Amino acid sequence: MELMPQETLRAVSLWAGANVLLLLCLGLLVTRLRIKVGAPVGTGDDAVLERAVRAHGNNAEYVPAALILLFLAGALGLSPLLVHVAGGTLFAARILHAIGIRQIEKYLPPARAVGNVATWLVILCLGAWILIATL
């Protein structure tokens, strides 16, 4: 028995791969900055490193749950088009958040706010769809 149609599996896999590569890039940026600042642990009170650590950490907090939801939604019959919409939105949202969190502004940078809200909306929509689909 097939878990999900190949087209849906390919869509889920595309966005899982893209988001994992983004997570790796953010992690590599943290490592590079740690070496530059000389802070093997923590941030050494460096604001740029602190922001990079938070961009990576925030991504690591939200993306795994979102990818699990994306996979489950695909397995429960979400169309490949909607998988692409959700996965692409998540990916774009995480990039926006990473850009926004690196901006030093007095108030919440718009890119960071949009990235956060879009991430939450993807998770909310996928979670609700899964609940409805399983009733």
Image (cartoon, rainbow, N blue to C red):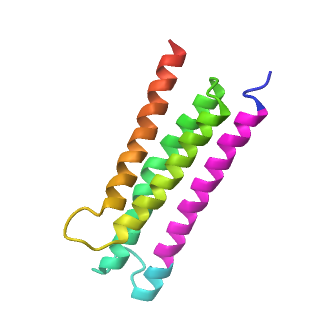
- Residue 26 versus residue 5 in the image, above or below: below
Left or right: 107 as drawn, with respect to 112: left
Please identify the residue farthest to the right as the structure is shown. 1
Residue at 59% of width from left, 30% of height from top? 72
Q: Quadrant of residue 76?
A: top right
Q: Quadrant of residue 20?
A: bottom right
Q: Position of residue 58 (x, y in %)?
A: 40, 56
Residue at 35% of width from left, 66% of height from top? 101
Residue at 49% of width from left, 76% of height from top? 31
Q: Nearer the viewer, residue 36 or 110?
A: 110
Left or right: 70 as drawn, with respect to 42: right
Q: Nearer the viewer, residue 29 or 103?
A: 103
Q: Position of residue 13 (x, y in %)?
A: 68, 45
Specify the quadrant that holds the N terminus: top right
Please identify the residue farthest to the left as the structure is shown. 106
Q: Quadrant of residue 44?
A: bottom left
Q: How many marks?
A: 0
Residue at 67% of width from left, 34% of height from top? 80
Q: Is residue 22 magenta?
A: yes
- Residue 81 versus residue 104 in the image, above or below: above
Q: Position of residue 106 (x, y in %)?
A: 19, 70
What segment carries the magenta color?
Answer: 6-31
Characterize the magenta stretch by its predominant secondary structure. helix
Please identify the residue farthest to the top as the structure is shown. 135
Q: Is residue 124 magenta?
A: no
Left or right: 90 as drawn, with respect to 106: right
Q: Position of residue 127 (x, y in %)?
A: 46, 29
- Residue 33 versus residue 91 in the image, above or below: below
Left or right: 68 as drawn, with respect to 5: left
- Residue 47 versus residue 1 in the image, above or below: below
